[in-house]
């Protein structure tokens, strides 16, 4: 039996970041201002600390300045909102990333909404979700945006396809479904309370697994020839899809790691340069990717 072809997110992300670095250098040369991404971290969760550090390193390699704000775990919602409002008002900051999760005592939505829409390069605000849903110019949630770029790179046209999104988070599952719907896919959302999840997945031409449950989706659930996007992040680099069995039935599949993850960061950096370009009033150019 022919195995699925791997969707190489690492290689595509590298090309996007290289193009982003060229655009950042050009913007800096033309305006004297370097695009700047501010990262905000509440507490010292080891995984979050590592992830933020990785984003900072990638930013520097792409010619994007990085400003890091580290707040104590006991920070209140009001204090966090104040910090985000200050960054939103700072003309030297072009994009803001609030690392999540932030702790149960913080009103996450209130914190996200303190980010100015024009600096919401992670695509987490109500405004960004609305522009994604209506197909208007704006910033996409980074992981769903990266997923769409992967589909395009592998010539997967969602139009007329049945797409099943397993997961309904505000920054992954829901926006992924809206972006697919905007491309004329017929979208079904599934989640932890879906009755007979396997039956729903078996109907899908495109499966987006984004529920955060290791190997929840088995190969026997995959429609032969389907495209499988595994956006799961579980300990031990295990996705939400049982890769070994799914690879025997899918036509295209993302590995974990090396599939969706690199695309998330690449989209974040690309949108940071987009934001800086808009805020500095520099004319946009058509991107090669």
Image: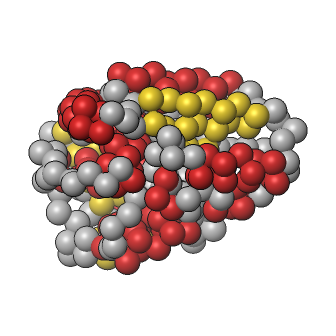
Check the image and tell me how it is coloured: secondary structure
Question: Who's the residue at 64% across and 38% down the image?
Answer: 40
Q: Position of residue 216 (x, y in %)?
A: 52, 48
Q: Position of residue 57 (x, y in %)?
A: 45, 22
Q: Nearer the viewer, residue 122 or 26?
A: 26
Is 27 rendered above or below residue 139? above
Give the number of callouts: 0
Q: Position of residue 194 (x, y in %)?
A: 57, 69
Q: Is residue 188 left or right of residue 104?
A: left
Q: Nearer the viewer, residue 238 or 139?
A: 139
Is 123 rendered above or below residue 12? below
Question: Who's the residue at 46% across and 45% down the image?
Answer: 94
Whether residue 16 is visible: no
Question: Who's the residue at 70% across and 31% down the image?
Answer: 70
Snapshot quadrant of residue 247? top left
Whether residue 34 is visible: yes
Q: Nearer the viewer, residue 91 or 272?
A: 91
Viewport quadrant of the C terminus:
top left
Viewport quadrant of the N terminus:
top left
């Amino acid at each position: 039996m022919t195995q699925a072809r791997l969707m190489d997110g690492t290689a595509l992300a590298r090309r996007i970041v290289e193009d982003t670095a060229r655009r950042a250098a050009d913007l800096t040369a033309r305006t004297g201002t370097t695009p700047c991404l501010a990262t905000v971290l509440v507490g010292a969760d080891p995984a979050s600390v590592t992830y933020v550090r990785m984003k900072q390193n990638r930013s520097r390699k792409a010619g994007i300045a990085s400003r890091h704000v580290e707040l104590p775990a006991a920070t209140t919602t009001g204090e966090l909102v104040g910090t985000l409002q200050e960054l939103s008002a700072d003309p030297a900051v072009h994009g803001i990333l609030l690392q999540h999760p932030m702790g149960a005592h913080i009103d996450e939505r209130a914190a996200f909404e303190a980010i100015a829409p024009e600096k919401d390069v992670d695509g987490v605000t109500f405004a960004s979700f609305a522009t994604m849903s209506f197909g208007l110019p704006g910033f996409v949630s980074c992981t769903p945006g990266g997923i769409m770029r992967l589909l395009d790179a592998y010539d997967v046209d969602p139009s007329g396809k049945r797409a099943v999104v397993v997961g309904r988070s505000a920054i992954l599952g829901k926006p992924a479904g809206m972006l697919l719907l905007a491309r004329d896919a017929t979208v079904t959302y599934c989640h932890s309370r879906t009755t007979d999840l396997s039956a729903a997945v078996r109907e899908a031409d495109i499966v987006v697994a984004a529920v955060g449950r290791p190997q929840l989706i088995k190969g026997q659930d995959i429609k032969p020839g389907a495209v499988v996007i595994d956006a799961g992040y579980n300990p031990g680099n295990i996705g939400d899809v049982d890769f070994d069995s799914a690879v025997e039935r899918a036509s295209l599949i993302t590995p974990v790691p090396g599939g969706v993850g690199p695309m998330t960061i690449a989209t974040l950096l690309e949108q940071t340069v987009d934001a800086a370009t808009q805020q500095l009033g520099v004319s946009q150019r058509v991107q090669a990717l």
